C-alpha cells in the first residue's frame, strides 16, 4: 500500500514537471504548439516600426513562454482598415478572412457586433484587471444591450488648445490679453476679435472636429445630444443650447475671427492663417515648428499647449476619442491569446512608451502620471519633441480634471456625426464668402456682416439641422 501511495505521488510530481517543461496550457495554449493570432492595424511610418518592435518583443518573451505568436499587418489608413474589416465581415469576393484582432472605432465595431462577430472580453479579464484602466475608456468599449466589453482600450486622445506662442506673445502684450482669457469659448471669441483688429483682418482661431464642439458643448450646457439606452438613440436638440453654440462659433467665423482653409487646422497654422487651434492631442506632432512668411521664407516658432476651452459657468468637459482593439469571436484559445497580448501591450510603462511615440494618452490609471512620462523618456532615452511631450502632459492632467465623454455607438451614428461636422461650418463658410464679397465692393465690415447675424439665420439653420438629424436617425 505504501508503495502504491509513493508511486502515485511520484507520478503526480512527474506530471507537474512535465507540464512546466512543455509550457502553459491555460485556455488551450501550449508553448510547443504555439497559437498564431493575426492583428490588423492602421499604424504607418515610425509608429508602425515602433509597434512592430513591440510585437517582436512580445513574441520573443511572453508569447514564447505561453505559446502565442502575434502576426501584425498594417492596412493603410483608418478608413482603409475599416473598409477591409467590413469586406471580410461581409465575405465580399476577394476579401481576406477576418483577423483575430483589429484596431477599430466603436461605430465600426458596433456593425460587427450586430453580426455576432466580436468576442466579449469580460470572459477573460477579472474585475481587478478591468479596474486598472481608466473607467470611461472601458465604458466606451461596452457595446450592445448586454453591455459586454467588445473594444479593448489601447491608446486614447482628447482635444487640446495649441497656440503659436511666437505670434501670440507680442499680440497679447499689445492687446492686454493673456492665456487665462482662452479658458472659455466666450473669452476665446473676444480674444479672436482683438487679434482681427490687431493683425489687420486675420483670423485668430481654427479647429478640427466641429462635431466634437457640438456634442461636448451641448452636454456641458446641460443636454446630451444623442442619448443612447441599450442601443436605442434619442435626439435631444435644445434650441437655447444650439443658440449658444452658434454665437460662439458661427458668429466669430462670419466676422472673420475664426477660419478654416486647409484640411486640418495645423495646415492653417503652418501658413500663418491662424495662430491658435483646437485639435486632437494625438495630432500634436503635426503642429508646425516654422511658419511660412512668403513663398520663399519661413520663420521658426514655438508652440504652447493649453487645456481645451469650456463655456463660462460650466463644469469642464472634453471629448474622449481614439481607436481600440476588437477581438473576433472564434475559439477559446485564440480569444484568450488575443487578450494576453492586449494586456501585455497596455502594461503601464510599455503603454506610456507607445504613447510618447504616438502622442496618444496611456489607458491605465497608473500610467496617467506626468512623472511616469518623464521616467520612461529618460529610461528609454527617447527624443520627443516639446509639443508632443507637452500635449501628453496637458492631456493627462486634463483627463484627470475634466469629465471625458464620448457618446455610445448607435445605428447611423457616423452619418449623424457628419451632419454635425458640416452643418454649422458650411453655413459659416458660405456666409463669410458673401461678407468678403461685399467688403470687396466697398461695404464696411459691420454693415456687410449684419444681415448674416440675424435671428432668422439662426432659425433657418436650426430647423435644417433638426430635420436632417431626425431623418438620419429614423433611417436606422
Image (cartoon, rainbow, N blue to C red):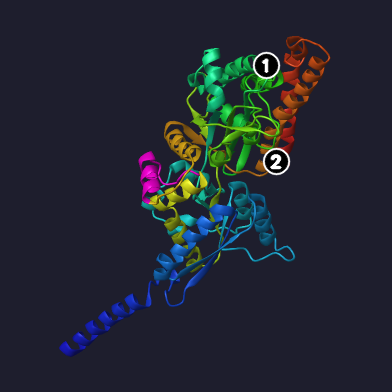
Give x and y (percent) for residue 378: 37, 47
Q: Is 251 on the left or on the right of 324, as rendered?
A: right
User: Residue at left 70%, top 41%?
Assistant: 415
Q: Is 8 on the left or on the right of 470, as rendered?
A: left
**Residue 371 sits inside the magenta stretch:** yes
User: Residue at left 64%, top 14%?
Assistant: 197
Q: Which residue bears the numbered disc 2?
A: 415
Q: Residues within 10 Å of mark 1 (few under 14, many from 20)?
A: few
Residue 235 in view of the camera: no
Query: Relative to residue 249, is residue 303 depicted above or below?
Result: below
Give x and y (percent) for residue 36: 52, 70
User: Residue at left 74%, top 36%?
Assistant: 471
Mark nearest the camera among 2 and 1 is 1
**Residue 194 sits inside the magenta stretch:** no
User: Residue at left 47%, top 33%?
Assistant: 403
Do tag 2 and tag 1 residues touch (Cβ < 8 Å)?
A: no
Query: Relative to residue 167, is residue 473 depicted above or below?
Result: below
Tell which circle, 2 or 1, labels the residue nearer the N-terminal end: 1
Q: Which residues are magenta?
A: 360-379
Query: Relative to residue 458, is residue 388 depicted above or below?
Result: below
Quarter of the picture containing the C terminus is top right
Q: Secondary structure at mark 1?
A: loop
Q: Residues within 10 Å of mark 2 (few under 14, many from 20)?
A: few
Give x and y (percent) for residue 307: 49, 30
How far apart are the two marked residues, 2 and 1, measured between alpha carbons? 39 Å
Quarter of the picture containing the N terminus is bottom left
Q: Which residue bears the numbered disc 1?
A: 200
Q: Which corner quadrant of the image does residue 74 belong to?
A: bottom right
Q: Nearer the viewer, residue 143 or 181?
A: 181
Q: Is 396 on the left or on the right of 14, as rendered?
A: right
Amino acid at each position: 500500500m505504501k508503495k502504491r501511495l509513493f508511486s502515485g505521488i511520484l507520478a503526480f510530481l512527474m506530471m507537474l514537471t512535465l507540464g512546466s517543461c512543455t509550457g502553459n496550457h491555460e485556455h488551450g495554449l501550449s508553448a510547443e504548439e504555439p497559437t498564431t493570432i493575426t492583428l490588423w492595424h492602421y499604424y504607418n511610418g515610425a509608429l508602425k516600426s515602433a509597434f512592430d518592435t513591440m510585437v517582436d518583443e512580445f513574441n520573443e518573451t511572453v508569447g514564447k513562454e505561453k505559446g502565442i505568436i502575434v502576426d501584425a499587418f498594417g492596412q493603410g489608413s483608418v478608413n482603409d482598415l475599416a473598409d477591409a474589416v467590413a469586406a471580410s465581415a461581409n465575405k465580399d469576393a476577394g476579401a481576406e478572412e477576418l483577423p483575430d484582432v483589429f484596431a477599430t472605432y466603436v461605430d465600426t465595431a458596433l456593425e460587427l457586433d450586430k453580426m455576432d462577430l466580436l468576442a466579449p472580453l469580460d470572459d477573460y479579464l477579472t474585475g481587478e484587471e478591468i479596474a486598472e484602466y481608466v473607467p470611461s475608456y472601458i465604458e466606451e468599449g461596452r457595446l450592445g444591450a448586454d453591455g459586454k466589453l467588445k473594444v479593448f482600450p489601447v491608446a486614447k486622445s482628447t482635444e487640446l488648445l495649441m497656440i503659436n506662442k511666437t505670434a501670440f506673445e507680442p499680440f497679447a502684450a499689445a492687446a492686454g490679453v493673456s492665456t487665462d482669457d482662452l479658458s472659455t469659448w466666450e473669452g476665446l471669441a473676444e480674444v479672436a476679435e482683438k487679434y482681427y483688429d490687431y493683425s489687420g483682418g486675420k483670423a485668430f482661431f481654427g479647429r478640427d472636429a466641429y462635431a466634437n464642439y457640438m456634442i461636448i458643448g451641448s452636454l456641458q450646457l446641460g443636454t446630451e445630444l444623442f442619448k443612447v439606452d441599450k442601443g436605442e438613440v434619442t435626439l435631444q436638440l435644445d434650441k437655447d443650447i444650439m443658440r449658444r453654440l452658434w454665437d460662439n462659433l458661427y458668429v466669430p467665423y462670419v466676422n472673420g475671427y475664426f477660419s478654416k482653409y486647409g484640411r486640418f487646422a495645423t495646415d492653417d497654422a503652418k501658413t500663418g492663417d491662424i495662430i491658435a487651434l483646437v485639435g486632437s492631442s494625438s495630432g500634436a506632432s503635426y503642429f508646425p515648428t516654422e511658419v511660412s512668411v512668403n513663398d520663399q521664407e519661413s520663420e521658426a516658432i514655438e508652440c504652447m499647449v493649453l487645456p481645451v476651452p469650456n463655456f463660462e459657468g460650466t463644469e469642464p468637459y472634453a471629448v474622449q476619442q481614439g481607436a481600440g482593439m476588437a477581438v473576433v469571436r472564434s475559439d477559446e484559445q485564440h480569444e484568450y491569446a488575443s487578450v494576453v497580448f492586449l494586456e501585455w501591450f497596455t502594461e503601464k510603462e510599455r503603454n506610456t512608451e507607445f504613447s510618447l511615440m504616438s502622442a496618444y494618452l496611456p489607458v491605465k490609471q497608473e500610467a496617467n502620471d506626468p512623472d511616469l512620462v518623464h521616467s520612461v523618456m529618460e529610461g528609454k532615452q527617447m527624443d520627443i519633441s516639446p509639443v508632443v511631450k507637452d500635449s501628453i502632459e496637458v492631456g493627462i492632467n486634463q483627463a484627470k480634471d475634466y469629465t471625458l465623454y464620448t457618446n455610445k455607438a448607435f445605428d447611423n451614428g457616423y452619418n449623424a456625426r457628419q451632419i454635425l461636422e458640416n452643418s454649422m461650418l458650411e453655413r459659416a463658410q458660405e456666409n463669410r464668402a458673401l461678407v468678403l464679397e461685399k467688403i470687396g465692393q466697398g461695404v464696411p465690415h459691420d454693415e456687410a456682416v449684419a444681415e448674416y447675424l440675424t435671428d432668422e439665420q439662426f432659425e433657418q439653420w436650426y430647423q435644417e439641422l433638426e430635420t436632417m438629424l431626425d431623418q438620419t436617425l429614423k433611417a436606422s
